[in-house]
Image (tube, grey):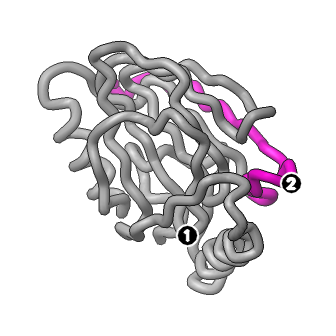
Amino acid sequence: MSGETTPLIEQHWFDDDGVVPNNPRLPLVVYRGVLESGPGAAAACETLFAGNGWSGGWRGGVYPYHHYHSTAHEALGIVAGSAKVRLGGDSGTVVDLHAGDVVVIPAGVAHKGEAASPDLLIVGAYPGGRGPDMRIPGKGYREQALANIAAVAAACHRSGVRQVRATDRAPASSAECCTK
């Protein structure tokens, strides 16, 4: 991205549906077209994320089943290809993601890959390099997951740092969400 235009920012709110906790306090945020594409895009995304306090990452796709992380937020940088991702559980929203997009998923929000182009490549990262847990909706650890999600928010609040908000810039362009 040239930096001369303001990126399109979308926010999606998901209620606790009794199976997926989602996040009652924070929206999932999609930043459209904020990453460069082409050769070296994955390394450039990793460098950008790390420079803004997001690390502990990986490269790959989105699992084809609903899952969420209760101990950390997650950023996904789409560096090649495209995907349809269901967000918020079975009753959630399907979002089309394309190379250049960044998605910031608050702790507790379910996500599932429903379709992907053959060249899909995503860079994932976590604020402060926090390693996330892997939760499958409805598997019996809901109370612990809810406590973890609340703890993520409380830790950010106690340390005087911001959390993900649609008015903030992406982890690709500034530090946010549990970073100073």
Q: Residue at x 63, y 85 (%)?
A: 158
67 vs 21: above or below: above
Q: Amino acid at mark 2?
A: Gly
43 vs 40: above or below: below
Q: Residue 36 in the image: x percent, y percent?
A: 28, 26
Q: Residue 129 in the image: x percent, y percent?
A: 35, 67
Out of 111 and 179, give the one closest to the viewer. Answer: 111
Q: Residue at x 71, y 41 (%)?
A: 88
Whether the magenta-drawn stretch holds residue 23 is answered as yes
Give left or right: position of 33 versus 93: left
Question: What is the CA distance from the residue labelled 2 to the residue labelled 1?
Answer: 19 Å
Q: Give the foreground label among 2 and 1.
A: 2
Give left or right: position of 143 versus 107: right
Q: Residue 61 in the image: x percent, y percent?
A: 37, 34
Out of 146 and 5, give the one closest to the viewer. Answer: 146
Label 2 sits on residue: 18
Quarter of the image with the N terminus is top left
Q: Farthest residue in the left direction?
A: 39
Q: How many marks?
A: 2
Label 2: few (<14), some (14–19) or many (≥20) C-alpha neighbours in 10 Å: few
Label 1 sits on residue: 71
| Quadrant in which residue 59 is drawn | top left
Chief secondary structure of the magenta portion = loop
Q: Amino acid at mark 1?
A: Thr
27 vs 69: above or below: above
Find the magenta span and give its range: 1-25
